[in-house]
Amino acid sequence: MRLAKKTALITGGGSGFGAGMARKFAAEGARVMVADINAEAAHEIAAEIGGCARTVDVSDAASVESMAQAALAEFGGLDILVNNAGVTHPPAPLETISQADFDRVIDVNIRSIYLTARHLVGPMKANRHGVILNIASTAGVSPRPHLNWYNASKGWVITATRTMAIELAPFGLRVNALNPVAGETPLLKSFLGDDTPETRAKFLATIPLGRFSTPQDMGNAAAFLCSDEAAMITGVTMEVDGGRCI
């Protein structure tokens, strides 16, 4: 029960890594709000873990503000914010990516962190404690061709995490990030482009431990970084990648 009496808000919590973190946080004693653009998925995970659900478009300012207000009203404050929602663009040469796909990556992967900070950092600073966990990617550390603008967005998340950690430390807030390698999530097909046994085998050959990261892996790492056991850890971007970035 490492997160007993803690409250947590997880964006993109209806599936994949977000759902894995929601399940682990609840198992460790936290009260969790599962926020997702897919209302049905959010409610399904929330019902499973005994949490609450919220439909949100993390790229929309009014939607994020409404989510933040709902979380503060539900919990009376917030201990843990997990910025997990993310998208990618189809793998292709960088100059061929459409502006619509580029804008969507920026809006969901970057703007969302700015928007949650706008509406939740103030209350967390006022309480003089809390943890923010941003989900970046190994793509921001060891980028691959044909995912240029996604790679760049995750590099931004890593830098934002470090500067947030420095600025918010005097207020008792810790800010860290996780860098997962591709996992068995709805985004896997987008990363691979052509999801076949051959493309999977080629990608897995780049991971020393020989497997994709799982929602459980992410849940375990996130629970540690968001717990009091990690009280001296801030500004860290931790790879959960089976050794891919070595």
Image (cartoon, rainbow, N blue to C red):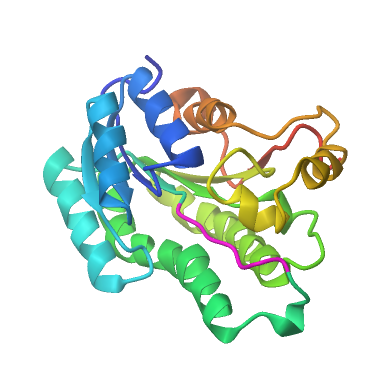
Q: Is residue 83 above or below residue 229?
A: below
Nearest the viewer among 81 and 138 is: 138
The chief SS type of the magenta part is loop
Q: Is residue 87 magenta?
A: yes
Find residue 65 and report its horizontal and vertical position in percent.
23, 64
Q: Give the position of the C terminus as an image quadrant.
A: top right
Q: Residue drawn at (65%, 66%), measured in percent from left and top? A: 150
Nearest the viewer among 139 and 73 is: 139
Q: Is residue 45 above or below residue 3?
A: below
Question: Magenta segment range?
Answer: 85-91
Find residue 190 and report its horizontal and vertical position in percent.
63, 57
**Can residue 70 be seen in this snapshot?**
yes
Q: Residue drawn at (54%, 70%), measured in percent from left and top? A: 105
Find residue 224 and report its horizontal and vertical position in percent.
52, 26
Q: Is residue 115 above or below residue 82?
A: below
Q: Which residue lies furthest to the left in this view?
A: 73
Q: In this view, does 95 lie above or below 235?
A: below
Q: Residue drawn at (24%, 40%), measured in percent from left and top? A: 43
**Can residue 34 be seen in this snapshot?**
no
Image side of residue 103 versus residue 240, left or right: left
Q: Is residue 48 magenta?
A: no
Find residue 180 and report its horizontal and vertical position in percent.
65, 42
